[in-house]
C-alpha cells in the first residue's frame, strides 16, 4: 500500500510544490506554496532567493543577504536555509494531526532578510495537501438493530456513521448496503458536512417468515485508489407492539450561546404513545451511535426528555452539534421513535486578542536590540495579533504605545512591523519600554497588552573631548627628570572600547630635537611628565599637541594644545667679560697724571639669568671703586657687595656710578 501511495502522488508533487502566488502588501510579499503531506524530511519546497529575485535585485549587489524565519507555532515542520532561503521539510507532516478535518490547512510563517538595514519581509503560506492515507472506519464491527414486525414501510432508523480523517475527495463519500428486498439506506448530510446513513424499511416485515437479517454496511471514499471500511448490521424482527412513541417534530433547531452556563435546559422533548401502562410509558435516550463528544457535552433525562448542557461549548472549536434522540416505550417488542436535535453554537466575544512579538532575540528575553546608527524605518520587531472569535468579535485594532521614536506599520492581514521613527542616540537614551495594545470590536470590547524593551546598542559616534582646548603649565627650571607636570582629561560618552580613551603626544620638534625627548604622557591616565631637566636659558617655552583617541572602530580622536613655560631661577653667576680676566685678575693701566674722578676703565659682565634691577649700593672706598667698579651685564647693573650679586638693570659705568653716589650725598 505504501508503494502504491508513493507512486500516486510523487509525480503530482513535483508540479504542485513550485506553484507560487505573489501578492504585494504595504511592506512585504506573500508567497504561497503547496506540498503533499507525508513527504520525506529534507524535501525542498522552494528557494526564496529565486522566487523573490525581483525584490532582491533592487538592493545593492555588494550585500551578502541572509534569510531568517520568524518562528511561529507549527513552523518547526519547515526549515529555512539562511544563505538562499531554501524551504524544506524539517519534520514529517501529518495533515490529519495538524488540521484535523479543516478543508484549509496551511503552515504560515514570516521570513526576513538580513542585515536589517536592507530588511525585506516575506509572508510564507505552505498549503498542506491531503493524500488518501486513511480508510473510512466504523466504531463497531457489529451493529445490532431491533425492528418491530409492525414497522411501517418507510420507517427510518439512524445508523452509526463511519469516520475518515482525510478531506475532500479522500474523505468519506458514500455508503452501500448488501442488496436485499426489505431494506435500503438513505445517505444524509449533517450540518457539519459529515455523511451518515439511515436504514429505511422497503416492505412489510413478517417475523414468522424471517426473524433475522445480516447485512453489510460499507463506507467508501473517492480517493485514488478508493478505500473503504464496513460493519455488519444484525437486524432482529420482533413481535408487534401496537403503538410506537411519536415526536412532535422530526427535528429541532436550537441556538446556544457559547457562554451558556452549565445545566442550561436546551429542550423539553415531548413524545407521545397512545398505549397505556408500560406500553405507553416512554423512555428517552441518545441513539447508540452518537459520538463520545456529544455524550460528554449533553445529557438527556430518560423520564422527561429534558436535554441539558453539562460541559461548556466553544464556538471556536465546534460550531454545531447533531444529536439523534430516540423515545421507546417499555412494552414488549417496542419500536423506538427518532428525532434529530441540531444545536447551533452562537459566538460571543469571549476571547481576548492574542499578541505575538518576535524580537529576533536569542532566548526568551523580551528585549530587542538596535544600533544607534540605525536609519529611520529600521526593523525592530514583528507583531502578529489573533482573535479566534468571529465577526466583529474577531476584528482587531492594534496600537503601539510608548514613544514617538517607534511606529507600528501594518504589513498584511493581522501582521505588523515595529520600525524606528527617528534617529536614535544611545548617549541621550539607552532603553525604551514599548507596549503593544490589541483591542477587538466586540461588545463589550476585549483587549490585550504586551510589553517589551528596546535597548540601543552603542556605536563609536563620539570622539573623546578634552576639558579645555589649551592647557598652560608653569614649571621651574632645574627640575629632576621624570618630574610630574600636569594631567589632561578627555571624556567619551560611548561604551566599552568605543569610550576607552588613550593619550599620546603628537610628534613635533623643539630646537631640532623631538618632543619625545622633552616630555611624555601616560597613555591611560593622561599624566604628563618631564623627561629631562629644563634650562630656562636654553628653552623658556615648549608647545606641543596632546591627542586623545578612543579604541572603537573606526577610531576617533581630538587634540588639545599644551604650552609649558619654564620659569627662571638664579642659577647662573655673573661673568666679567671686560676687561679680560686672567686668574680672576685684570691689569688696568692708569696714567700718572690721572686726577680724582678720571675714568680708569669700564667693567662689563654678563648673567644668563633674567629679572629686574635691585638698588645700587655704594662702594666703601676709592680703592674699591678703582678695582671693583660697576660693570655692564646685558640689561643688569651689579656691584662688588653681596647685594649686588643679585642685581638686575641697565648698563653702568664708573662715571655713572659716581654721579649716582654724589646725588645721594
Image (spheres, helix red, strand yellow):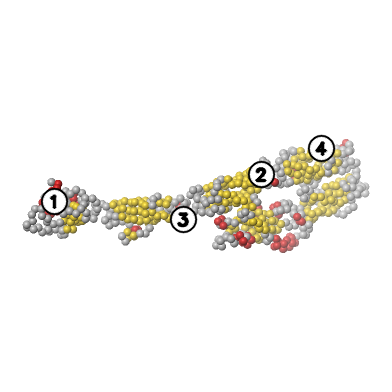
Q: Secondary structure at mark 1?
A: helix
Q: Position of residue 461 (x, y in %)?
A: 47, 54
Q: Quadrant of residue 463?
A: bottom left
Residue identified by numbered label 1: 658
N-terminal-most mark, 2 or 1 = 2
N-terminal-most mark, 4 or 1 = 4
Q: Residue at x 62, y 52 (%)?
A: 411
Label 3 environment density (alpha carbons within 10 Å; few <14, some 14–19, many ≥20): many
Q: Is residue 622 left or right of residue 229?
A: left
Q: Quadrant of residue 27?
A: bottom right
Q: Nearer the viewer, residue 535 or 134?
A: 535
Residue identified by numbered label 2: 441
Give the number of the disc on residue 303.
4
Give the number of the disc on residue 552.
3
- Alpha-carbon span between mark 4 and mark 2: 45 Å
Q: Residue furthest top?
A: 277
Q: How many marks?
A: 4
Amino acid at each position: 500500500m505504501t508503494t502504491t501511495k508513493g507512486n500516486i502522488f510523487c509525480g503530482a508533487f513535483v508540479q504542485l510544490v513550485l506553484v507560487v502566488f505573489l501578492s504585494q502588501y504595504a511592506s512585504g510579499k506573500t508567497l504561497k506554496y503547496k506540498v503533499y503531506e507525508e513527504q520525506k524530511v529534507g524535501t525542498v519546497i522552494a528557494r526564496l532567493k529565486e522566487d523573490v529575485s525581483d525584490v532582491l535585485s533592487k538592493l545593492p549587489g555588494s550585500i551578502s543577504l541572509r534569510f531568517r524565519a520568524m518562528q511561529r507555532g507549527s513552523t518547526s515542520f519547515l526549515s529555512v536555509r539562511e544563505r538562499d532561503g531554501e524551504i524544506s521539510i524539517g519534520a514529517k507532516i501529518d495533515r490529519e494531526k495538524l488540521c484535523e478535518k479543516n478543508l484549509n490547512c496551511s503552515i504560515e510563517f514570516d521570513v526576513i532578510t538580513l542585515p536589517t538595514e536592507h530588511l525585506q519581509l516575506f509572508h510564507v503560506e505552505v498549503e498542506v495537501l491531503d493524500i488518501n492515507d486513511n480508510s473510512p472506519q466504523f466504531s463497531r464491527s457489529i451493529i445490532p438493530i431491533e425492528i418491530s414486525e409492525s414497522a411501517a414501510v418507510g420507517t427510518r432508523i439512524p445508523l452509526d456513521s463511519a469516520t475518515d480523517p482525510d478531506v475532500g475527495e479522500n474523505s468519506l463519500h458514500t455508503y452501500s448496503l448488501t442488496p436485499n428486498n426489505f431494506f435500503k439506506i438513505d445517505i444524509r448530510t449533517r450540518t457539519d458536512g459529515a455523511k451518515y446513513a439511515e436504514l429505511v424499511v422497503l416492505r412489510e416485515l413478517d417475523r414468522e417468515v424471517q426473524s433475522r437479517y445480516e447485512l453489510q454496511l460499507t463506507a467508501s471514499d473517492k480517493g485514488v485508489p478508493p478505500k473503504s471500511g464496513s460493519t455488519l448490521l444484525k437486524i432482529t424482527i420482533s413481535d408487534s407492539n401496537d403503538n410506537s412513541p411519536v415526536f412532535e417534530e422530526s427535528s429541532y433547531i436550537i441556538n446556544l450561546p457559547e457562554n451558556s452556563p452549565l445545566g442550561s435546559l436546551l429542550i423539553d422533548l415531548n413524545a407521545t404513545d397512545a398505549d397505556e401502562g408500560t406500553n405507553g410509558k416512554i423512555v428517552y435516550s441518545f441513539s447508540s451511535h452518537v459520538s463520545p463528544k456529544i455524550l460528554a457535552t449533553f445529557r438527556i433525562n430518560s423520564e422527561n426528555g429534558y436535554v441539558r448542557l453539562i460541559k461548556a461549548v466553544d464556538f471556536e472549536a465546534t460550531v454545531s452539534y447533531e444529536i439523534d434522540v430516540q423515545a421507546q416505550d417499555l412494552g414488549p417488542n417496542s419500536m423506538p421513535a427518532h428525532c434529530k436535535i441540531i444545536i447551533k453554537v452562537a459566538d460571543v466575544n469571549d476571547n481576548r486578542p492574542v499578541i505575538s512579538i518576535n524580537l529576533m532575540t536569542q532566548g526568551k528575553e523580551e528585549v530587542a536590540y538596535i544600533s544607534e546608527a540605525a536609519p529611520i524605518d529600521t526593523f525592530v520587531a514583528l507583531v502578529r495579533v489573533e482573535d479566534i472569535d468571529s465577526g466583529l468579535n474577531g476584528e482587531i485594532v492594534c496600537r503601539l504605545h510608548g514613544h514617538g521614536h517607534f511606529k507600528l506599520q501594518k504589513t498584511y492581514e493581522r501582521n505588523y512591523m515595529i520600525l524606528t521613527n527617528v534617529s536614535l542616540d544611545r548617549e541621550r537614551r539607552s532603553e525604551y519600554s514599548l507596549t503593544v495594545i490589541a483591542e477587538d470590536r466586540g461588545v463589550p470590547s476585549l483587549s490585550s497588552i504586551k510589553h517589551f524593551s528596546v535597548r540601543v546598542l552603542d556605536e563609536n559616534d563620539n570622539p573623546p573631548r578634552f576639558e579645555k582646548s589649551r592647557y598652560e603649565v608653569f614649571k621651574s627650571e632645574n627640575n629632576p627628570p621624570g618630574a610630574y607636570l600636569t594631567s589632561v582629561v578627555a571624556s567619551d560618552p560611548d561604551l566599552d572600547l568605543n569610550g576607552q580613551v588613550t593619550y599620546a603626544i603628537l610628534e613635533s620638534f623643539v630646537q631640532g630635537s623631538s618632543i619625545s625627548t622633552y616630555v611624555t604622557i601616560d597613555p591611560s591616565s593622561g599624566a604628563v611628565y618631564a623627561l629631562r631637566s629644563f634650562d630656562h636659558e636654553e628653552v623658556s617655552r615648549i608647545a606641543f599637541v596632546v591627542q586623545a583617541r578612543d579604541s572603537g572602530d573606526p577610531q576617533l580622536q581630538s587634540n588639545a594644545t599644551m604650552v609649558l613655560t619654564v620659569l627662571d631661577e638664579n642659577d647662573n653667576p655673573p661673568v666679567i667679560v671686560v676687561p679680560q680676566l686672567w686668574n680672576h685678575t685684570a691689569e688696568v693701566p692708569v696714567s700718572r697724571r690721572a686726577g680724582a674722578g678720571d675714568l680708569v676703565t669700564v667693567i662689563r659682565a654678563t648673567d644668563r639669568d633674567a629679572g629686574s634691577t635691585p638698588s645700587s649700593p655704594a662702594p666703601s672706598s676709592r680703592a674699591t671703586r678703582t678695582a671693583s667698579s660697576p660693570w655692564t651685564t646685558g640689561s643688569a647693573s651689579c656691584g662688588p657687595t653681596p647685594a649686588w650679586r643679585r642685581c638686575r638693570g641697565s648698563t653702568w659705568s664708573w662715571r655713572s656710578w659716581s654721579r649716582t653716589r654724589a646725588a645721594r650725598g
